Amino acid sequence: MRILLVSEYYKPHTGGVEKVFVNLAERLANFGHQCNLITSRLPNTPKYEEINGVKIHRINVPYRGDRYWFSLLAIPKVMKMAGQADIIHTTTYNAVLPAWLAAKLTGTKSVITIHEILGDMWLKLPGMNIFTARIHRFIEKVLLKLPFDAAVCVSNYTCNRARGLGLKVNKLKTIYNGVDSNFLTRENNKKTRKELGLPDGCFIYMYYGRPGISKGVEYLIQAVPLISDMISDSKLVLILSHTPQNRYKKISEMIKSLNIEKLIIFLHTVSDNTLISYISASNCIVIPSLSEGFGFAAAEACNMGKPVVVSNVASLPEVVSGEYIMVKPKDPEAIASGISRIHKGDTQKSRKKVFDWDRCVSQYIDVYKAITAGILNK
């Protein structure tokens, strides 16, 4: 098949959406499908290149400016390439409009992957005023109700949210994301602990990812002094990307205002291999999210056999396995108590869940075949 993927960002940009489309695109190409991808052009990247069989076309957009620019500036390129594709596949949010418009005008079959639906959660997110929140909620609803031929959700939770918006059940399918094979069960990494300047007896709890408004990082930061009181020899390893910049700045300022710099090892985005060594060196991973469509950090940590403390919200109960503690969201005391329970070995336990990329991509191919055959349009 000839597949045109449309995603606002792609590697070298990092994030959950990019992780899905990199694995999808490269495996589709490896399975012999013709795969073109249209995305934003990042600094120091060429307008066109081919990586692992995927032909990448980058659109010039104002970088780190208004993210909605891609929705408009990508339209001509997507329109031009749509007629050469059997399937147009896009993802929430800012790639939706050009993909749907091109599919509609050219008659090309279309698929959308829905990673997360915030809905009324927009009104409850920290730092967002009511006017902006309502605009985002309205735009999200409009985009998700556009009539794609099929909609894939990354969890049953997200799928149920989509049904609540009125999306047709016969066009909805849950396909779980995969976990990269290098996130494997590992023993405690003493070498990494030594590099971090931490003794074997130090209890390390870790967060990694973006400081996005739905990630709940500020509640973990507020929990740090409470955790220190409960576990005197403890340290938070905080690996935080710089984007969104305003959120990164807020978290940095919060750490200074609470005077807890000595209780935190604050790092920036690292390579996958380095990240894995840090996870391996940690005693537990913390996912204090307010909402998650899938929850890569939770799935990756559980796959490595690490205990996790996760908010009892959204898709996280679907994803976690092994040893874990579920806690109330937006509650620093609950986070601290959960980490203390892991320190004492008092955890919930379940059979390990497996999330496989090859199975994920195979299910996407089944969706492509179904819509080209007209099965999902009846």
Image (cartoon, helix red, strand yellow):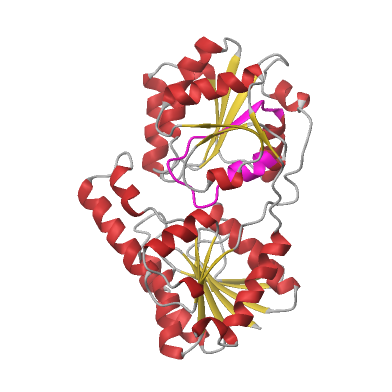
Judging depth in this view, the residue of 85 and 293 nearest the camera is: 293
x, y percentage for residue 342? 62, 23
Residue 285 shown in magenta = yes
371 w.r.t. 14: above or below: below
Image quadrant where residue 375 sits: bottom right
Hey, which residue is sitting farthest left in the picture?
Answer: 131
Judging depth in this view, the residue of 189 and 242 nearest the camera is: 189
Write down the region rendered in magenta. 281-302
Image quadrant where residue 286 sits: top right
The answer to whether residue 93 of the structure is visible from this angle is no
**Residue at x-position 51% and y-position 20%:** 337
**Residue at x-position 52% and y-position 84%:** 81
Image quadrant where residue 285 sits: top right
x, y percentage for residue 367? 60, 75
The quarter of the rendered structure image containing the N terminus is: bottom right
Is residue 53 shown left or right of residue 319? right
The answer to whether residue 246 of the structure is visible from this angle is yes
x, y percentage for residue 280? 72, 32
374 w.r.t. 357: above or below: below
**Residue at x-position 61% and y-position 42%:** 320
Count how many numbered circles sit on residues in the image.
Answer: 0
Is residue 207 shown left or right of residue 283? left
**Residue at x-position 45% and y-position 90%:** 106
263 w.r.t. 165: above or below: above
Residue 304 shown in magenta = no
